[in-house]
Image (tube, rainbow, N blue to C red):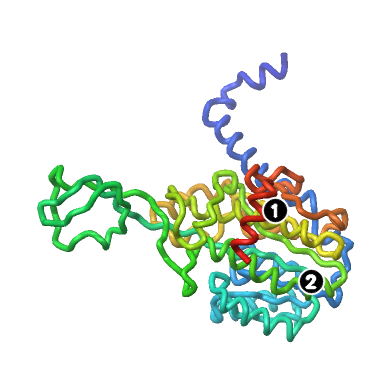
C-alpha cells in the first residue's frame, strides 16, 4: 500500500516521470565506464610502444592521454601537424610524460601512410599496440534530376544524381520540365589515389597501415590491434567498388556505415592470418560519443547532435571500451572478435563474417 501511495502522489506526474526516464538514460550511458577502471588494470606497459591514429581529438586523444599516464612510448598519429602539436602539449601537461612522439599522417592517403610507416619503423621497430581510430563522417547535398529537358536548354536522361554545382548557372526554372529535390548525399571527394575519402580513411588506410606494421607487431612478441568500429556497421553492406567511389548508390551517411562494415570484415580476416604470431586483432564499438566527427555536416545536423549530446558519452567515456580492448588481461589471446560498447563479445554483422567475402575484399584491398 505504501508503494502505491508513493507512486500515486502528485510528485509522480508526467514531468517527474519524464525527468526520471531522462536521468536513467543518462546513467545508463555512463555506468559501464565505472565497471572497468584503467587505474586497476594490472597490465605492465613499461617500455612498450603504442600507436593511435586520429589522436589529435576525440576518442583518439583520450585514449592516448590515458596510455601516456601508464608510461608507454606514445605515438600520436595525426593528420594536422598544428592540431597534433596542440594535442601533444595538452597530453604532456596532463600526463607529465616525456615519452610522447608526434607522427604526421593522413590516413586517407596511401602515400602518406607509407611514409609514416617507414619513419615509425625506424624510430620504433617493435610496436605493442596499434589503435586504428581515425575516421571521417562527411555529408553534402546532391540534386536528383527527375526530368529530361529544362527550358534553359539543359538536357539529361533520368535517373541522375548530380552535385548542385553541376546544374547550369542561371537556370531558375520551376516548371515540370526540370524538377529536382535536394537529398542528403555522400561526398564525392577523392584522394590523390582516386579513392573515396570516407572509405580510404575508415578502411583502406587502416588496412595498409596495419599490414605495413605487421613485422613490428610480431617482433613485439605479444601485441594487439584494436579497430574502432561503430554500431552503424549494421546498416552497411559490402560493395568493393565503393573503394574507388563507384558501386551501388548509397543513402545518407551510408558510406560511413559501409566503411565500418569493411573494417569489421578486415578484423576477422587479419586475425585469421595472424594466428599463432602473438598478435591479436579485435574491433570494438565505443558507443555514441559526442566528438567532432559531425563537423562536416550542415549546421542543422550539428545542432541536433549537440542537443542530444546529453545522452551521449563524452570522449573520455568513449575511450573506455577502446582501452579495455587494448589492455585488459582477460583478453590475452582473444582475437577476431567484435565487442559491444559495454565490453561484451557480440556477433559482427553477417556480411563481415562471410569468409569468401572477406577473402575477396582482402584481395581487392591488397
Residue highlighted by disc 1:
284
- Relative to the observer, which residue lies in front, 249 or 164? 249
| Residue at figure coordinates x 73%, y 43% from the top left | 346
Q: Is residue 318 visible?
A: no
**What number is the disc on residue 200?**
none
Residue farthest toward the left in the current orientation of the protein: 151
**What number is the disc on residue 217?**
2
Task: Give the vertical position of 280 relative to 340 (above or below).
Answer: below
Residue 204 coordinates in the image, percent (x, y): 59, 65
Residue 247 coordinates in the image, percent (x, y): 46, 54
Element class at badge 2 = helix
Task: Give the vertical position of 142 relative to 100 (above or below).
Answer: above
| Residue at figure coordinates x 65%, y 60% from the top left | 362
Mark 2, mark 1: which one is toward the viewer? 2
Q: Earlier in the sequence, mark 2 or mark 1?
A: 2
- Relative to the observer, which residue lies in front, 203 or 297? 203
Residue 160 coordinates in the image, percent (x, y): 30, 51
Element class at badge 1 = strand
**Residue neighbourhood size for the residue with mark 2, other residues' Cα within 10 Å, grouped as few (<14), some (14–19), many (≥20):** many
Residue 118 coordinates in the image, percent (x, y): 68, 83
User: In screen coordinates, is 244 left or right of 126?
Assistant: left
User: In screen coordinates, is 214 left or right of 77?
Assistant: right
User: In what quadrant of the picture does the N terminus appear?
Assistant: top right
User: In what quadrant of the picture does the C terminus appear?
Assistant: bottom right
User: In screen coordinates, is 287 left or right of 165?
Assistant: right
Q: Quadrant of residue 332?
A: bottom right
Give how far apart the Cα atoms at labels 2 and 1 are: 19 Å
Circles 2 and 1: CB atoms closer than 8 Å: no
**Residue neighbourhood size for the residue with mark 1, other residues' Cα within 10 Å, grouped as few (<14), some (14–19), many (≥20):** many
Q: Quadrant of residue 203?
A: bottom right
| Residue at figure coordinates x 81%, y 64% from the top left | 279
Q: Is residue 92 visible?
A: yes
Amino acid at each position: 500500500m505504501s508503494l502505491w501511495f508513493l507512486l500515486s502522489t502528485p510528485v509522480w506526474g508526467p514531468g517527474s516521470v519524464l525527468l526520471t526516464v531522462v536521468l536513467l538514460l543518462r546513467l545508463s550511458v555512463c555506468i559501464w565506464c565505472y565497471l572497468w577502471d584503467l587505474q586497476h588494470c594490472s597490465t605492465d606497459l613499461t617500455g612498450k610502444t603504442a600507436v593511435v591514429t586520429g589522436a589529435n581529438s576525440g576518442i583518439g586523444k583520450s585514449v592516448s592521454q590515458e596510455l601516456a599516464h601508464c608510461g608507454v612510448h606514445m605515438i600520436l598519429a595525426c593528420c594536422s601537424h598544428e592540431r597534433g602539436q596542440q594535442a601533444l602539449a595538452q597530453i604532456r601537461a596532463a600526463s607529465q610524460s616525456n615519452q610522447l612522439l608526434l607522427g604526421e599522417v593522413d590516413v586517407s592517403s596511401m602515400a602518406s601512410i607509407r611514409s609514416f610507416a617507414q619513419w615509425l619503423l625506424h624510430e620504433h621497430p617493435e610496436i605493442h599496440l596499434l589503435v586504428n581510430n581515425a575516421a571521417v563522417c562527411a555529408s553534402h547535398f546532391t540534386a536528383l534530376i527527375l526530368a529530361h529537358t529544362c527550358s534553359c536548354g539543359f538536357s539529361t536522361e533520368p535517373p541522375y544524381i548530380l552535385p548542385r554545382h553541376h546544374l547550369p548557372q542561371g537556370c531558375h526554372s520551376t516548371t515540370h520540365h526540370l524538377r529536382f529535390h535536394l537529398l542528403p548525399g555522400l561526398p564525392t571527394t577523392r584522394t590523390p589515389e582516386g579513392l573515396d575519402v570516407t572509405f580510404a580513411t575508415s578502411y583502406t588506410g587502416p588496412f595498409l597501415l596495419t599490414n605495413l606494421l605487421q613485422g613490428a607487431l610480431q617482433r613485439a612478441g605479444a601485441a594487439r590491434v584494436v579497430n574502432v568500429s561503430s554500431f552503424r556497421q549494421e546498416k552497411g553492406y559490402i560493395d568493393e567498388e565503393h573503394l574507388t567511389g563507384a558501386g551501388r548508390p548509397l543513402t545518407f551517411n551510408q558510406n560511413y556505415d559501409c566503411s565500418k562494415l569493411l573494417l569489421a570484415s578486415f578484423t576477422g580476416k587479419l586475425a585469421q592470418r595472424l594466428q599463432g604470431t602473438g598478435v591479436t586483432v579485435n574491433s570494438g564499438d565505443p558507443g555514441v560519443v559526442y566528438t567532432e566527427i559531425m563537423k562536416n555536416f550542415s549546421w542543422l545536423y550539428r545542432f541536433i547532435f549537440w542537443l542530444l549530446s546529453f545522452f551521449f558519452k563524452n570522449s573520455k567515456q568513449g575511450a573506455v571500451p577502446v582501452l579495455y580492448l587494448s589492455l585488459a588481461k582477460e583478453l590475452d589471446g582473444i582475437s577476431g572478435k567484435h565487442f559491444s560498447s559495454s565490453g561484451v563479445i557480440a556477433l559482427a554483422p553477417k556480411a563481415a563474417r562471410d569468409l569468401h567475402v572477406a577473402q575477396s575484399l582482402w584481395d581487392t584491398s591488397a
